[in-house]
Amino acid sequence: MGCGASSPAQAPPSGGGGGAPPQAAAAAGDSRIIDNQLERMKQEEEGKIKMLLLGAGESGKSTIFKQMRLLYGTERSDDDLRMYGVVARSNIVVAVRKLCTHLRNLGLEEELDRESRENEDLEGGDHSAFTCRQAYDELMAYLVDNTATAAEEGGVGAGEKDWVGQSPRAGLAANNDAKQFLAHHESIRILWQSKTMKRVWDKRSAINVIDSHKEYLNDIPRIASPDYRPTTQDVLIARVRTTQVVMERYRIDGIDFEMYDVGGQRSERRKWIDCFDQVTSVIFVAALSEYDQTLAEAKRTNRMVEALELFRSVCNNRAFANTSIMLFLNKRDIFAEKIMYSDIAAQRPFSDYAGPAKDFDHGVLYFIQKFKDCLIDDEFNDSFIHVTCATDTNNMEFVLDSTRTIIMTDNLKRSGFLGAD
């Protein structure tokens, strides 16, 4: 009745056509298993959400990256926290170097002398060992001009064990700066509390100090303590320059997410193209507060202008033709503070600003329109724009949850599973 086997008890002849040999049948079964695994892997890969963080340097990309881990990932290990402890202390020293140099360049040393004399004369003034002028002189000698010798430096008190210690992961420069912090933290505290330094801080846009590091400077004794363990906020505001592509995976509500963080400085952008393949969404981060600042790597280039040009090139890049692009206008808290004393219209690139001075809403809407003007087509939905504070976990939880929903919905639309609006 056909060419099948004659009975269950009879084996087909070797090499005959009565049925597949056991080896062939096993191979066919293995092949089906492999095919099924490959198909499953393909489906998982197609269902994965790949998010890419782009933007200029110091816009807050890495802080958003850290917020994702805080909200959806694993807790930091003690080794992580020790590394961030070294970085926090190092960040303070970097800020103090810039601020002390700026104080001198602004010609405010005589004002510091007057303040020191006034404090000595006032009953209830600062009776610590150093005046603010003496603290400044010490910091200039050890941290800026390097005229003091290492033998004169102090350190952690005898018998005290510092929990943070050293961290090879932080790098040699950061560890050295952290040691300098422990040796001079009291002078840093005294100088930071001076009225003269507050004036220097208000003029910080010229020296590119990280704005959020004011939180560190306001909390010197805690960070100098031998028992210091970095808090979540300390980790979020810690500044470590991103010099390589960093990726973390999360599984949220049954969906796999991959988020990529890349360096934003000009020298790092050549690495971006390696991450462009099969990107589901780009989150472009720009700092609202940088409208009056220049690039660290190009002192004549306004940071906001750089962000606008970069956004234009990303949005109009053919690699992202079928990619959701979200715009995070970050550092809204610093922007709200800065517009009180730094007029938007006074900045040459934004002299066309016609809104009232010191008005947060008008300022934000002005810059939103600037970014919209970068687009070739006009299909950028307002729901894709968020005004954020990356160091505020509650704000970022809401924004990232909304972003996740929008990205998944947009991805389904692009795949044809949902109709277009």
Image (cartoon, rainbow, N blue to C red):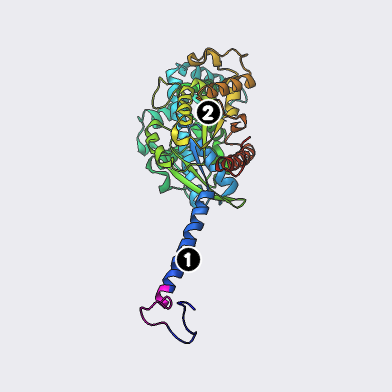
Q: Which mark is residue 33?
A: 1
Q: Earlier in the sequence, mark 1 or mark 2?
A: 1
**Majority secondary structure of the magenta segment?**
loop
Badge 1 amino acid: Ile
Callout 2 secondary element: strand
Magenta-colored stretch includes residue 101: no
Q: Is residue 10 above or below residue 350?
A: below
Near-viewer residue (69 or 224) = 69
Q: Range of the magenta residues?
A: 12-24
Left or right of 313, for residue 196: right
Q: Which type of secondary structure does the marked residue at label 1 adopt?
A: helix
Please name the residue shown 36% across and 39% down the image.
Answer: 151
Rendered image quadrant of residue 178: top left
Neighbour tally class for label 1: few under 14, some 14-19, many 20 plus, Cα within 10 Å: few
Residue 207 screen position, x and y as percent:
45, 24
Q: Is residue 18 magenta?
A: yes
Q: Nearer the viewer, residue 7 or 186?
A: 7
The tag on residue 287 is: 2
Contact between marks 1 and 2 (CB within 8 A): the answer is no
- Horizontal side of residue 268 vs 389, given as left or right: left
Image quarter where the C terminus lies is: top right
* Image location of residue 93, percent across then percent down: 45, 34
* Classed neighbour count for the residue bearing mark 2: other residues with Cα under 10 Å, few (<14), some (14–19), many (≥20): many
| Mark nearer the viewer, 1 or 2 | 1
Residue 346 vertical placement versus 73 (above, below): above
| Residue 76 appears in view | yes
Residue shown at the point (43%, 84%) measured from the top left: 11
